[in-house]
Image (tube, rainbow, N blue to C red):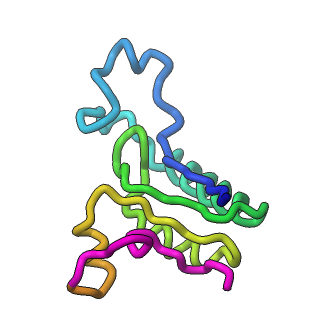
Amino acid sequence: MKVLWFHLMPYTELPDDFKERHPGVWVEIDPALFDPERAHVMYNDFMDELEFAADRGFDGICVNEHHSNGYGLMPSPNLIASTLARRTKDAAICVITACPLRMLLTSGTSTPPTGRTASSTANQPE
């Protein structure tokens, strides 16, 4: 069995009355709620958490494609995975994407990924 750590990278500082005043956090979220200075701190905390999970022996750390909404601040799972590849050593890095086209465009291949190639296994121990 493999044990993976998954992170959504959510915006953690929505107002307490968010549910009552806003229709949702998906596409229609009010951009005025976003504080870039606080998000900078959040990004660093999230990266630290992913790196901590890798250091503690999780078999893999996972990043996903729920970008630019209240559920996830990740701009691109490939960008986050590439920074993790440099800063971790033993955990597999798994990119979970809802967009197979993104994988094609960033993989350097003209054929769709199949099987495990849909997830990055960079840094996987041999």
Looking at the image, residue 34 lies above or below residue 89: above
The residue sitting at the top extreme is 20
Residue 126 picture location, percent across and down: 67, 85
- On the image, the x and y values in percent for residue 96 come to 42, 59
Q: Which residues are magenta?
A: 111-126
x and y, in percent, of residue 94 in the image = 51, 66
Q: Is residue 74 magenta?
A: no
- Image quadrant of residue 105? bottom left
Q: How many marks?
A: 0
The residue positioned 63% from the left and 52% from the top of the image is 45
Report the residue at 40% width, 75% height from top: 117
Location of the N terminus (image quadrant):
bottom right
Could you tell me residue 116's position as x and y percent? 44, 71
Can you name the residue that lies furthest to the right here? 56
Q: Residue at x 54, y 55 (%)?
A: 43
User: Could you say which is closer to the camera, residue 20 or residue 7?
Assistant: 7
Nearer-the-camera pick, 98 or 42: 98
Depicted 91 relative to depicted 8: above or below: below
Q: Quadrant of residue 57?
A: bottom right
**Dominant secondary structure of the residues highlighted in magenta in the image:** loop
